Image (spheres, rainbow, N blue to C red):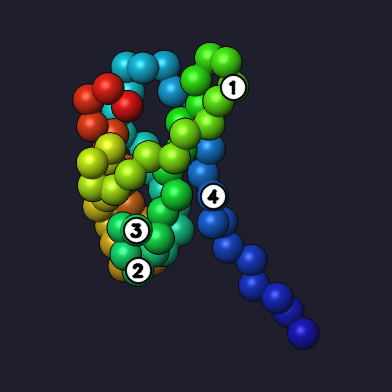
């Protein structure tokens, strides 16, 4: 028996300049994603869809793109 494995998480180190990030797995709704940011003190904050980010590629097997709104 073979168990299939898929990527279900992508991590990125942001610089405050880049606003768009790829995700490389299939989702069925934008709300399937958990998008977080970590400040310089190490405090993690969950971002809210669609206030803090937008999503493209919903339903695509290869994933899509997350675009953060200004200030995130």
Residue 12 visible in image: no
Whole-percent x, y for residue 51 in the image: 23, 41
Q: Is residue 26 left or right of residue 51?
A: right
Residue 9, placed above or below residue 1: above
Contact? badges 3 and 4 (CB < 8 Å): no
Disc 1 secondary structure class = loop
Q: Residue at x 73, y 79 (%)?
A: 2
Category of crowding for the residue at label 1, using alpha-carbon neighbours closer than 10 angstroms: few (below 14), some (14–19), many (at least 20): few
User: Which residue is denoted by mark 2 in the rendering?
Assistant: 28
Q: Mark 1 touching mark 2, by CB under 8 A?
A: no
Most foreground residue, 41 or 22 = 41
User: Which type of secondary structure does the marked residue at label 3 adopt?
Assistant: helix
Say which label, 3 or 4, has the lower sequence index.
4
> Which of the 4 image quadrants contains residue 25?
bottom left
Q: Which one is in front, 30 or 8?
A: 30
Where does residue 14 sit, x and y in percent of width and height? 44, 23
Q: Residue at x 31, y 58 (%)?
A: 30
Q: Earlier in the sequence, mark 1 or mark 4?
A: 4
* Nearer the camera: disc 1 or disc 2: 1
Quick one: which residue is furthest to the right in this view? 1
Q: Residue at x 35, y 68 (%)?
A: 28
**Which mark is nearer the camera, 3 or 2?**
3
Q: Is residue 15 above or below residue 23?
A: above
Residue under numbered circle 4: 9
* Residue indicated by mark 3: 31
The residue under label 1 is: 42
Viewer-closest of 5 and 27: 27
Residue 9 spot, x, y in % from top left: 54, 50
């Amino acid at each position: 028996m073979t168990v299939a494995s898929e990527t279900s998480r992508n991590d990125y180190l942001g610089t405050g300049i880049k606003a768009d990030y790829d995700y490389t797995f299939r989702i069925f709704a934008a709300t399937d994603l958990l998008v977080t940011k970590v400040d310089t003190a190490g405090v993690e904050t969950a971002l809210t869809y669609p206030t803090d980010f937008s999503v493209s590629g919903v339903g695509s097997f290869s994933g899509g793109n997350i675009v953060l709104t200004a200030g995130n």
